Amino acid sequence: MNTITIVLLLLTVVVISIVIVVVSQMRERARIERARRVASLEDAYNRAFRIYDELPGQYLTRDIKLLLLRRMEEACEGLRQESTELPVKEWLATVRENKQMVMDGTDEHPKVIIDSPEKSNYVKELLQSLFKLIEFLHKSGKINASTAKANLRHVLFTIHKTHADLFVFQARDHVKQNELRKAIHAYHLAASEMAKSRGNDMAAKAVAAFKARIHELEQELSSGDRSHSAEQQTKLDKQWDTFLHDDSWKKKADYDD
């Protein structure tokens, strides 16, 4: 075997080795990239599902429910293309079933009484996650500017309401215990929280209702007459409990300013 033949054989071995290494690296990069896509899609599904499943019903509008379900549906479609071992078929079937129920108005999301700082903070965390998701969907071009603006304003408003919910619960409890000064203080805190939603007519009406109740409690405190207290308290409680679902209030809310 002459020198040229040996050199050519060595070159062939080197070239084949380089090709094997390059192909191996390309396959590894493809594997890593696929794993990254799958992880990203699974995370997108889980985040949207957590908000949809765990956020109390009083904070979810029809539009936000559909936004979350579309996000889950999109993630499932992506995962299905990746042929993963995740139960994507079952996820997708559930998402589409829930989507149809939301469109038909037959879905059920139970309301939760915000009666502790822990519940208030937990709901606030979910709302903040929802806020970030809407921002992402807007920046990525998945929803238009007007839709994003309306939903972001609503979410920001409900974050303030979450804190107000806790203060209202405390105020109700103080009234039942005949601790009117503490009830007045709690209603002041609730009014201050709702006042943070500047330019929102629903928030302004809530602030006015709290101030009116504070005035009534102050009069009761000074006169000692509580003959109408239960009636007034029941009226305010009913208004607040249906606050986000009262059509007459919603029509007054201007989300386009």
Image: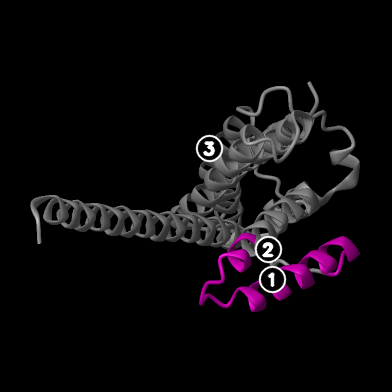
Could you say which disc has been placed on residue 92 in the image?
Answer: 1
User: For residue 215, what is the image quadrant?
Assistant: top right
Per the image, is 249 magenta? no
Task: Give the distance between the C-alpha atoms of the residues marked 1 and 2, in whole angstroms.
Answer: 25 Å
User: For residue 157, what is the image quadrant?
Assistant: top right
Could you say which disc has been placed on residue 53 in the image?
Answer: none
Could you say which disc has been placed on residue 185 in the image?
Answer: 3
Q: Do tag 1 and tag 3 residues touch (Cβ < 8 Å)?
A: no
Q: Amino acid at mark 2?
A: Lys
Please provide percent x and percent y for residue 24.
Answer: 31, 60
Could you say which disc has been placed on residue 111 in the image?
Answer: 2
Q: Image check: 3 left or right of 206?
A: left
User: Start and end of the magenta stretch?
Assistant: 78-106
Label 3 element class: helix
Of marks 2 and 3, the one in the foreground = 2
Task: Give the distance between the C-alpha atoms of the residues marked 1 and 3, in whole angstroms.
Answer: 48 Å
User: For residue 200, what is the image quadrant?
Assistant: top right
Label 1 element class: helix
Please provide percent x and percent y for residue 220.
Answer: 67, 41
Of marks 1 and 2, the one in the foreground = 1
